[in-house]
Image: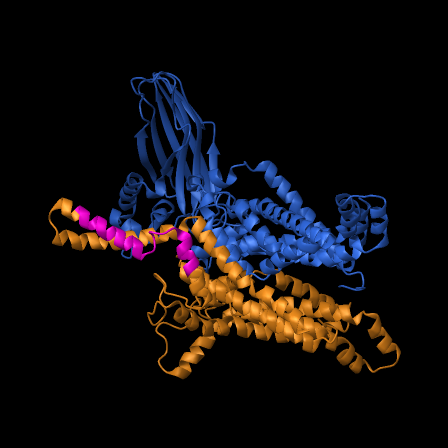
Chain colours: A orange, B blue
Amino acid sequence: MIKPLFYRSLSLLLVAPAILLLMALTLGLTGISDRILVSMAEQTLQEVKKSLATQIHDPSALEAAIELRKEEIYSSYGLDKPWFYRMFQMIIRIATFDLGRTRVIKSFTGSQEVSEIILERIPNTILLVTIPLIFSAIAGISMGVKIASRPGTLLDRLTSYLSIISYTLPSWWIGIILIILFGFYLKIFPVSGMYSIPPPSDTFSRILDLIWHSILPFTTLVIVQIGGWIYSARMIVLNIAQEDYVNAARAKGLPEDIVRRRYILRVAAPPIVTNIVLGLSGSLGGAIITETIFGWYGMGSLYYQAIMTLEENLLIALTYIYTLIYISARIILEIMYLALDPRVRY
Amino acid sequence: MSFVRELVKKAWESWSTRIGIIFLAILIILSILVVLTYPIDFGTRIWSNPSYWADSPRLAPPIWASFFTMAKIPTHTAFKLTQPTNIQVEENLILMEYSVETNYGYDDYPSFLHVLIKNVTFYSTKPPRIEVWISRPDNLIVRLTSFTIRGPSPIEEPPYHRYVESPYRIILTQDSTSILNLIYSLNKKYNSNITLDEVSIIGSEKLFFGYPSKLREKEFSILRGSYRLYVKIYVYEGLGSVGEVDFILGGKTYGLLGTDIIGRDLMMGLLYGFPASLMIGFLASVLVTSIGTLLGVLSGYIGGRTDTVIQRSSDIVLNMPLLPILIFFTFIFREFGMRFLLIILVLTAFSWPGLTIIIRPMVMQIKSSQFIEAAISCGASRIWIMRKHILPNLAPFIIAQSIFLVPSAILAEAALSFLGLGDPTLPTWGQILEQGFRSGAIYLGYWWWVIPPGILIVFTAITFLLITIGLEPILNPKLKTVI
C-alpha cells in the first residue's frame, strides 16, 4: 500500500524539476538570458569606463585597461562560459530554495532578496484570493448539494444556468465593470489599490481601509467562482444520486435524510474535497489578472511584473513555488483518498 | 458517420443544446459575413492604422447613449459630395462650388469640423485655388481659409494629379488661419475681444457653432439654425476636376457602439472578433483533441513502455500551472510574429494531457472486448484496429470533449490578450478590452469600450457550454437528468 503511493508521489515530484528545466532551457536557448546579462554587464562597464577615463589619460593605456576590466566584468556575470553552466547552477540553487536576488524589483522594505519579496506578498494574496475562494466554495457547494436533491425544478434550472454564466465570466471583465459602476459612477468603493493615499495611521482604521479596498475584488472573485462550485457540486451529487444502490436504499425504506447523508454525500465527499484542496493550493499562486486590475500587490501581480521585466530569478522561483504548492496538495490528496474513500486500495 | 447522426439526434433532445446550436449558427453566420466583407489585411491596414480613423471622433459613446441624457447630443455626420453643387464658367476660369446646408439643433458642440478634398486633376501650369467658407444663422459669412494646390514640377506632364493616394485634409477646428478669420468676424459682429490665445480655453469648436453670449466671461452659447459650408475651387485655363469633397462634422456620439481613443469604430473591431475568436477556439480545440486522443489511444492500446512514457509525461504536463506557463511562453516567443498561432500552439502543448488521461482507460476497456479479439484473430493490424474499431467507439465522447475545449481556448486567448500578449495583426475582443483598460477606461468611465467585448466573449463561451450540457448524457450514460 505504501509502495505505490510512494511511486505516485515520486512522479508528481518530478513536475518541479521538469518545470525548472523547461523554463531554464527556454530562457537559455532563445538567448534571452544572455541578452539580459550582457546588457547588465555593459551597463557596469559604462560606469567603469567613466571612472577609468578620469584616471588614465593615455588613450592606448585606457583601451587596454578597459579591455581588462571588460573580461573581469563579463566573467563575474558568468558570461565567459556558455549559458547552460549558468542555468544549471541556477536550477540547482533554486531547487534547494536558495532563491537568489532580483535585478530591479524590490520588496516594500527595499530588499532585493527573492524569498523576502515572495513572503511579503503571500498574505496579500491570501486576503485577496484565498478568502473569496473559501467563501465561494462553502456557499457554492452547499447550494449545489441543495439543488441537486431536486433536479429539474425551476430553482434547479435557474441556478444551473446562472452558474454556467458565472463560470464563463472572465474575472477581469467583471472587475472592470464593477470598478466602473461602483468606483467611477457611484463612487462608493475605491477604484484601485490596497490602501488609501495616504494610508490611515492607526492600525484599526488601516484594517477598515484594507477591507473597504478589498470589497470590489472580493465580490468579483465570488461572482466568477461561485458558479463553478455550484455546478460541480451539483454534478457530483447528481451522478451519485442516480446510482442504483441509492435507489435500493430508498426502496428498502430508509429515511431520505439517511439516504442523503450516508449514501450520497459520503460518496460525494472525496471529489468535492479534491476540488477544495486543489482550489486552495491554486489560490496561493494569486490571481494574475485580477490582482493587476485592482492594483493589488499579491503573488499574481508579482509574477506579471517579473515577466514584463524578465526577472529570471524571480520568475523561475515563483513558478517553482506555485508548482511545489500544487504538487504537495496533490500528494496530500493521494493520502487523503486512502482515508476518505474506502474503495481506493493500492 | 452514423455516430455523428446519433450524437446530433440525442443532443437535439436537450433544450440547452438547441439554444446553443442556434447561438452557434448566429456566430458562424456573422463570422462568414465578416470574412466575406472585410479585407484580409484588416488588422494591419485598417484597424491598427491611426490615419484610417483620422475623420472619426475620439471616445464617442454610441448614438443610443443620448437617450439616457435629456440633451440632444450631436451625432457624427459626413457629407460626401462627388459633384459640384454649382459651376460657373468664365473666361479662362471655372469656379466649382461644393456646398452643404445643415440645420444645427443640438444641445452640444460637435467635436471637430474637417474638410477633405480628394483626387484633383488639372491641366494648366497655374494650379487651382481652393477656398473654404462658412455661412452661419447669424448672417455671418466668413472665408475660413484659402490655399493654392501645389503646382506642377518641371518634369511633370499634364494632366496633373493631386491628393490621389490620400485626401487633403483641412482640420478647420485646429487650423489657425480659419480660427483667426472667425475670431475677427465674431469680434466685429458681437463687439467681443477674443484673442487667439484664449481659443484653447474656450474650445475652437465653439467659435464655429456658437456665439459669445456673455462678453466678460468669454462664455459661448450654441447658435442653432441653418449653416452652410462651402468650398470654392477656382480652376484656371482649361479643364480640371475634383473627385470628392467631404465635410465632416465630428459627433459626440458615433455609430451603434461608439469609438475608442484613436477614433476607431468599435463595432467594426468587435465584428471582426467573431471569426477571430472562432478560429482560435476551433483550431486550438482540434489540435488538442487530435494530440490528446492520439496519445491516449496509443497509450491505452499499445501499453508497456509506450504507456508508461505517455502517462508519466502527461502527468507532469497536467500538473504544471497553466496560466503562468502560457504567459511565460507567449511572452518569450512574442517577437517571432504570428502571435495568434503561437498562442494556439502553447495552449495545445500544455492542454493535451487532460484528454489523454481520460481516454486511456476507455481504450483499455474496448481493447479487452471480444470483437477486438475477433479482429486480431482475423489478422487485423494494430493500426487497423485502432482506426476502425477503437476510434469510432470513442468518437461521440471525443466530439463532445472537443466542443468543451473551444470556450476554454477562447477564454485563454482573451486572458492573454488582456495582458497585452495578443496578436496586433488580428484584433480580438480581449485586445479591445485591454486597450480600453490601458487607456484608463475605469478611471474615465468609458463603459461602451469595455462592456461589449466582454459580453461577446461570454456569449461565445456560453454557446459552446450550452451545447456540451446537452451532450452530458452521452459522455456519462448513467446520468439521466442534467438540467
Quadrant into which the C terminus of chain A falls? bottom right
User: Is residue B278 visible from the viewing direction of this image?
Assistant: yes
Q: Main secondary structure of the magenta part?
A: helix
Task: Give above or below for B25 relative to B71.
Answer: above
Which residue occupies 67% across, 54% down?
A: B305
* A37 in magenta: no
Quadrant into which the N terminus of chain A falls? bottom right
Which residue occupies 37% across, 50% down?
A: A35
Which residue occupies 62% across, 63% down?
A: A167
Q: Residue A42 in the image: x percent, y percent?
A: 28, 51
What's the magenta region?
Answer: A63-89
* A84 in magenta: yes
The one nearer the camera, B50 or A342, is: A342
Q: Residue A73 in the image: x percent, y percent?
A: 27, 55
User: Is residue B195 visible from the viewing direction of this image?
Assistant: no
Q: Residue B348 in the image: x percent, y percent?
A: 59, 51
Residue B482 falls in which quadrant of the image?
Answer: bottom right
Residue A312 falls in which quadrant of the image?
Answer: bottom left
Task: Give above or below for B85 relative to B446.
Answer: above
Instruction: Please give left or right for residue B294 compared with residue A221 in the image.
Output: right
